[in-house]
Amino acid sequence: MEHFSGSFTQQEPIPEAGVEAAIEVLRNGRLHRYNTAGDEIAQTALLEEEFAAFTGARYCLAVASGGYAMATALRALLVCPDAPVLTNAFTLAPVPGAIASIGARPVFIETTPDLTIDFTHLENMARETGARVLMLSHMRGHLCDMDRLMALCDSLGVRVVEDCAHTMGAAWNGVPSGRHGVIGCYSTQTYKHMNSGEGGLLVTDDAGLAARSVLLSGSYMLYSRHRAAPPPEVFEAMRLDVPNISGRMDNLRAAILRPQIAMLDDRRMRWNALYAVMEAGLDQTNGLRLIPRPAAESYVASSFQFTLPGWKPARVTALLARCAARGVELKWFGAPDPVGFTSRYEHWRYAASPRLPQTDAVLAGLIDMRLPLTFSTEDVALIARIIRAEVLAVGQGEVAPVTALRMGD
Ligand SMILES: *Cc1c(COP(=O)(O)O)cnc(C)c1O
């Protein structure tokens, strides 16, 4: 019987150019972004300029984490304590956490079988709660129809902040992810598309929001050292009114990240090649549903999802155990208790929510795995053969009620 022996959590090393730049920062000791010698430009300021250019945004701010970027976006938008903030029910803990961190209230929106936000429920909840902001999480890299979403949110008077933790380098109809909403937030944590251990980036075209974000991140009165930021006049109008909530990025992380921007496109192609092998290997497996990818979506497939529509929990558990015994670590969003990074909305008790039956039905059968770039296409083909064989084996005893779970879209 075939067995897989690779690691689902082993990332690639930091590129040599990043290692060298990091050592240079360590040697000169100027790690703080505002600690520069003479007319030196800080690594952090250069990173912001380069990432702004990469996304086509006018302004960019580098911060301590993706979660911090999201909280900063909400603060910059002047979301008040207790205010409702719409967000995806299918997301990860830092998203409701960012909303809760400013004392606001997450309002979870239903999930379609294609793992994106449900527009009908979104519209209903926007009207019912009067929420003015949507924190849109492009969870696991699945983009909703961004043209329809923006038209809907514009008509509702809802401003969109994009959580692009899984979509750095992705696009909808040619527009980069993070550039549809008023602010885009990215994470550079180890498991994302660029790796600095921890880190985050925020982009926007709005000068007021950019200036407020810079001040919020803890710029003291050194905002003129930012290059991908609005001119000093914009800051002068507000600099005494915005609190300092320190969450800056440092030059060490920025040095590690800068050479990775140019690698994003190559990484996208390699990830998508692995994804295509997995998709082909699992296609036409009875009881297993692949997630369709719309033609307008240009994705970066750093992970892979499929659903087991209608499967009872005991059968899913049996499948996970059998795959694990063959070295294939699958994550399940239907587990009763949170496991590692995998949790779902009712596990976030501080953000009480009514049951969301559509989301519950989707998550009950949702299987997730990472596709690290340390995998070869042969590795992925082997993993697909193991999953396929076990899905068929576990499915043999009884007939899987493969109900078409088409709802809401
Ligand atoms: C990782 C992640 C974030 C941000 O995470 P940080 O660890 O704070 O950088 C936000 N949203 C999602 C969906 C994530 O997976």
Image (tube, rainbow, N blue to C red):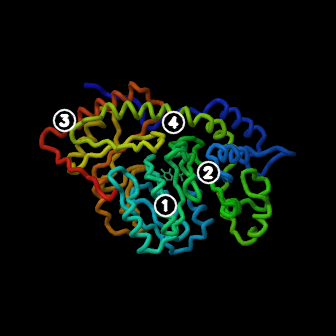
Left or right: where does residue 271 sit relative to residue 187? left
Q: Amino acid at mark 4?
A: Arg
Disc 2 target residue = 201
Q: Which mark is residue 74?
A: none
Please tell me whether mark 3 sits on a helix, a strand or a loop: helix
Q: Amino acid at mark 2?
A: Leu
Cβ–Cβ under 8 Å for marks 2 and 1: no
Give percent across and percent down for residue 161. Answer: 54, 59
Q: What residue is shown at x 33% (from left), y 27% (from top)? A: 382
Disc 3 target residue = 393
Give percent across and percent down for residue 146. Answer: 48, 53
Q: What residue is shown at x 24% (from left), y 48% (from top)? A: 309
> Which of 332/182 is in front?
182
Disc 4 target residue = 268
| Mark 1 residue crowding within 10 angstroms, few (<14) / some (14–19) / many (20+) | few
Marks 2 and 1, how far apart in space?
26 Å
Please tell me whether mark 1 sits on a helix, a strand or a loop: helix
